[in-house]
Amino acid sequence: MVSGSTGCGGGTTPDDAFTPDAFDPSLDAAPECREDRECADGLACNGDETCSEEGLCVAGSPMRCDDMLDCTTDFCSEELRRCVNRPPDVDGDGVFDADCLDARGMPFGEDCDDAVATVNPGAPELCDRPMTVDEDCDATTFGPDVDGDGFQDARCCNGSACGDDCNDASRSANPMATEVCNGSDDDCDTRIDEGVLVMGYRDADGDGHGDPMAPMTACGTRAGFSTLPDDCDDTSALRSPDLPEICDTVDNDCDGVPDPADSTVTATWYADEDGDGFGTSSRSTVSCAIPTGRWSLYATDCNDTLASVSPAQAERCNGRDDDCNGLADFEIAPGDLEDDDLDRIADSRCTPTPVPADCDDRDSSSGPGGAELCDGRDNDCDGSVDEMVASFAYFRDEDGDGYGGGAGGVVVGCVPPPGYTPRGGDCDDRDPNRYPGAAERCVMGRGGIDDDCDSAIDEAPASNDCRPTMTFQEQACIAGACRVVGCVEGRFDCDGNAVNGCESTGGC
């Protein structure tokens, strides 16, 4: 129940300020009449005027609009011709304050923070780190689902509750996913590759066959690992059970017999442009002897322009697939790989720190060269947060009317902090009924107060609150009081009484 001006009219006159439109019989005689319509003033909020059996006008009973709730603004609307009990919407986002409860104890609205326009049930939930703000007023949401797998980032929280997606940059990682052997926690149970590791052997030369004397447990896709324990020389890619016997006096096929004297075997050789011992199928030749130049018996090089990339190389923390297993999977720590968000930019946690470096390797939209967004995070990885994003001045709003005054403090940013508003100009930040755009009101005892902060006092529409008590009067707001300022032709105000003015029909 928050009320304002005196009288009823102008569409927004509070009920508890009504003055009955009747005259005071103790002061003067009531106007004479023959029927009710002669007494009617055309207003709904002050009740229906009637003509008594004695032929005198009798005032109606004003509508009482007080709902007995402290948080609502109660008034009678002439436009609607009924009472209105309006819950607060301080931040002007179109959603009523959830803290305002009706007579049953139920909230009128769903706005969980009526001081911030960017917080309401229709606002997008942001992943606030480390500060938590419930933008959409839903405690069960914690931030966007970046990978679209139906689960929210475990790093995003609302209070103590957080999401449950351990890698929101990968659709294959969430609490309902199946664990696969890849060095990551796919099913988000904090364990890595549980139940999917296989027994095998070290494959140091990258020929697909392992050293029977070097058993190990690993993922089948890991470079330098093989489930086949049949390599007769794990230091040379020219010796493997899969290779043909070539003319080089070496036991290439691991059968224990080097270069049979009567061998006519020829092999396909692949161009090895970078000379790392592995080639590609783009160019080949056939020969029993090793051809002149750079050639390889393997067409398995994933980048034949870099000698540092081949199936025999060790993976490095650089955001690149160095060992040609199809993944940039250097393990920084258990469950933390060099490029978890698959944006081909190495994690800044790599040692030494690569250039460029990904400052958030679990968010594919963040990285060097990215666009800075207004979300409280360093999206472009330049060490600054929300820079180059449109910034605005926000004013401290002490009285919660949606407007702030400069004396209360001003901050600059792209989103308003709690308790601040982008709208300034409040001439009294202690009174929620005074702010730019408020209706100028005519309230007895409030004379000399500027309600709409335009430096003028009791100007229109204040006088709209001053509906004449009878149809033959004209009233205006003067110094916070409704006063008779004119009469229709044939009526006269002889005693200057503001209540029953224009009472005389015969002159003064």
Image (cartoon, helix red, strand yellow):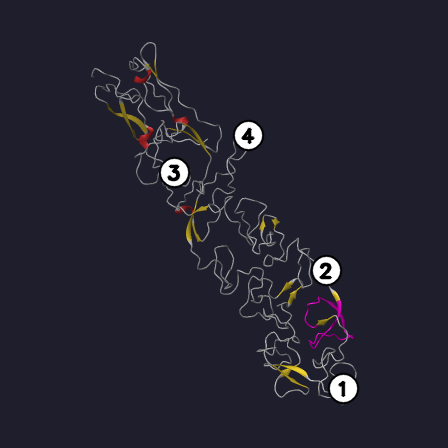
Whichever of labels 1 and 3 marks the residue nearer the N terminus, that label is 1
State the mark number for residue 385. Answer: none
Horizontally, residue 458 falls left or right of residue 275, namely: left
Q: Name the element at disc 2.
A: loop
Q: Residues within 10 Å of mark 2 (few under 14, many from 20)?
A: some
Instruction: Identify which residue, 184 or 4, lies in the foreground.
Output: 184
The residue carrying mark 4 is: 104
Question: Given the current orientation, which residue lies at the most extreme top position?
Answer: 54
Q: CA distance from mark 1 to mark 3?
A: 100 Å
In 3D space, how far apart are the residues under numbered discs 3 and 2 (Cα atoms)?
A: 65 Å
Q: Residue at x 39, y 46 (%)?
A: 424
Secondary structure, mark 1, is loop
**Alpha carbon of mark 1 to alpha carbon of mark 2: how far?**
43 Å
Q: What residue is disc 2 on?
A: 194
- The range drawn in magenta is 199-224
Q: Amino acid at mark 1?
A: Pro
